[in-house]
Amino acid sequence: MESLKWQKEKEKREKASLERHARLSKLFKTDRLAFERERKEMIDELINSVKDEGKRSRLRAFQDSWDKKMRGAGSSHNRFVLAQTFFGEHFHEVWNPAIQKYNVILNGKPDGRNP
């Protein structure tokens, strides 16, 4: 019974997400200012929903830093390249070391792929 309920709720969430994406996509193409205003409101809503003040402050600082970096990009292509670069840096500086740490904990030795 729970599985059926979860599946129906999943379908509702999926439908709502697709509708929101279509609306935002149209807004992006037709009214960039309104799109940016809505994007900012969605981000603020998410950040403000975090109960821990410290986490909320870190999220706000991270978003402000991201927005500042993206503002200086100059073009949509440059913004895309910057986003890829930031993701790559984060992967190599944060995720990969954590993966390596837990690999050693679980397996007792480094995997040897990365120095």
Image: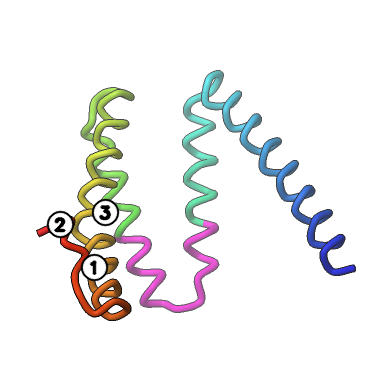
Q: Does residue 51 show up magenta in the picture?
A: yes
Residue situated furthest right in the rendering:
1
Q: What kind of element bears circle 2?
A: loop
Q: Find residue 29 and report its horizontal and vertical position in percent.
A: 53, 20
Quadrant of the image containing the C terminus? bottom left
Q: Amino acid at mark 3?
A: Phe
Location of residue 27 (image quadrant): top right
Tell whether label 1 touches label 3 (CB within 8 Å): no
Numbered label attached to residue 91: 3
Q: Which residue is mark 1?
A: 100
Magenta residues?
A: 45-61
In this figure, which colouring scheme has been used for the structure? rainbow
> Mark 2 and 1 residues: CB-CB less than 8 Å, in contact?
yes
Residue 96 vs residue 94, the one in the foreground? 96
Name the kind of residue labelled 1 in the image: Gln
Residue that protrudes farthest toward the top in the picture: 30
Real-space CA distance between mark 2 and mark 3, rounded to the nearest whole angstrom = 13 Å
Secondary structure type for disc 1? helix
